[in-house]
Amino acid sequence: MVRQRTRPGDGQPVRPPADDDPVGALLVRTARGDEPAFAELYEHVAPRVYGLCVRVLRDPGQAEEVSQEVLLELWRRAARYQPDRGTGLVWVLTVAHRRAVDRVRSAQARTDREERAAATATPRGGDEVAEQVTIRMEHQQVRRCLRALTELQRQAVTLAYYHGRTYREVAELLGVPLPTIKSRMRDALIRLRDCLAVAR
Amino acid sequence: MNRGYPFRRHSADVHTLIGPYVLDAVTGPERHAVERHRVHCPSCDAEIAELTATAARLADSTIRTPPEALRQRVLAEARRTRQDPPSAHADAVRRIGWHGWDAVAAVLLLVVFAVLVTYGVQQTRVDRARQQNAVAQSRQQDVAAVLAAPDAELVPTTLPDGARGRLVVSRSDDRAVVTLTGLPALSGRHTYQLWLVSGAGHPASVGVLDVGTRSTTRVVSGIAAAEAFAVSTEPAGGSTRPTNIWASVPLTG
């Protein structure tokens, strides 16, 4: 496959591709040790990987460390990506989310975060403020679909995906029995799937 | 596979874990149970794949420009890192030969090493964070001021070559916040320069990126009179007039 440059849809290359899969194509090339393809892959996915890590870890320093691990894992394990099992972007985000969640759950990470917060009280960078505003303007769709869930469904998804909580912790936090929380998570994902697919 | 009641009860338990599994809200053993189960259950496997793609969309609302240093570190590290083979044998191989005192000694060594490294890294990080603090603070105030302006407006920004741009303009504040990411790499000692173009005079330079920089967020002043924002490619250090306009974004209308 000689693809000189992935063709971005109208200037929005980091959006999930509808029928084209530039990230998947770059992963396939990366698996063959193609360094320029990996550099291009970085440009496509780094803002998503880093953004997700910041959201889950709530600490730019640790998010940077975990992002580096994830991005290097993409280089090392690109050959594990199977194009027939989903788009490249989904694979990348699955790897990134799992890593971020593993880190947020480790006791060491918690201690580090607390120590650092006390030591430096780093202000939110300009990028963060800018991103928050533009996110508000640009990424209404996910928010709209999240709002369409029931309160319990939304909290379950938010605590699990964005805060890295286990379903047991979520059940405890929300005061709901375990079987209920497990099925609410699944129901919520099914509703999100339908909502996001319709609006696409 | 019909192995009777115990097996079926087990799969039913595993089945209820699909939602938590997709959200990474399970423990390690539960994760493995689901992964073993999906191999034998095509319908579960299809559902997990579909819901995993849905969960990935939740990351749509978290995109953020990473620090430029990350890119350099990742690409340099990749150059030095050997890639894994396609199969999953590596994990199994790693377990062979780990028994008895060998393992205990190795674990002790690792713990000592980890403690030393963690301490060193921690100190460096705290120092670095302190230095960045002052710079970030002043820039953050500028960015926040523009974004908080009552007339702040997101200007549609389409860039060539897969790059991404965002422009939030406040005419009352006479400033804009520009975010550029994924700028294509330039050959030789070339870089990007940012301009404001007004109807009458020459384009005014509002900043030059360092050579090799491919993303930036900055506050640009003097927006009120400008009709367009432009990005050009220039020799290192920038030019007084744009040499080669790479992208232009109209600000009026």
Image (cartoon, rainbow, N blue to C red):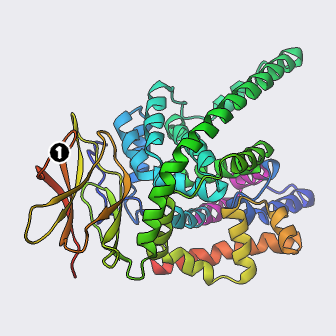
| Residue A66 relative to residue B113: left or right | left
Disc 1: which residue:
B234
Query: Residue A112: x and y, percent?
Result: 73, 44
- Quadrant for the N terminus of chain B, please: bottom right
Q: For the residue carrying disc 1, how many other residues have a C-alpha within 10 Å: few (<14), some (14-19), or many (20+)?
A: many
Residue A85 can be seen in this image: no
Q: Main secondary structure of the magenta part?
A: helix
Q: Nearer the viewer, residue A189 or B178?
A: B178
Seen as rendered, the residue at the extreme right is: B6
Query: Residue A4: x and y, percent?
Result: 26, 44
Label 1 sits on a secondary structure element that is strand
Query: Residue B23: x and y, percent?
Result: 68, 61
- Quadrant for the C terminus of chain B, please: bottom left
Q: Please say whether residue B37 is one of the residues in the magenta stretch.
A: yes
Residue B160 can be seen in this image: yes
- Identify the chain of the residue marked 1, using the numbered disc in the image: B
The vertical placement of B216 against B102, above or below, is below
| Residue A63 relative to residue A43: left or right | right
Residue at screen point 77% across, 42% down: A108
Q: Nearer the viewer, residue B34 or B79?
A: B79
Quadrant location of residue A11?
Answer: bottom left
Residue at screen point 72% across, 50% down: A118
Q: Nearer the viewer, residue A181 or A109?
A: A109
Residue at screen point 65% across, 31% down: B89
Query: Residue A157: x and y, percent?
Result: 69, 70
The vertical placement of B191 against B217, above or below, is above
Q: Please say whether residue A139 is one of the residues in the magenta stretch.
A: no
Magenta range:
B31-51
> What is the tally of numbered marks visible in this picture?
1
The vertical placement of B123 against B234, above or below, is above
Q: Nearer the viewer, residue B226 or A154?
A: B226
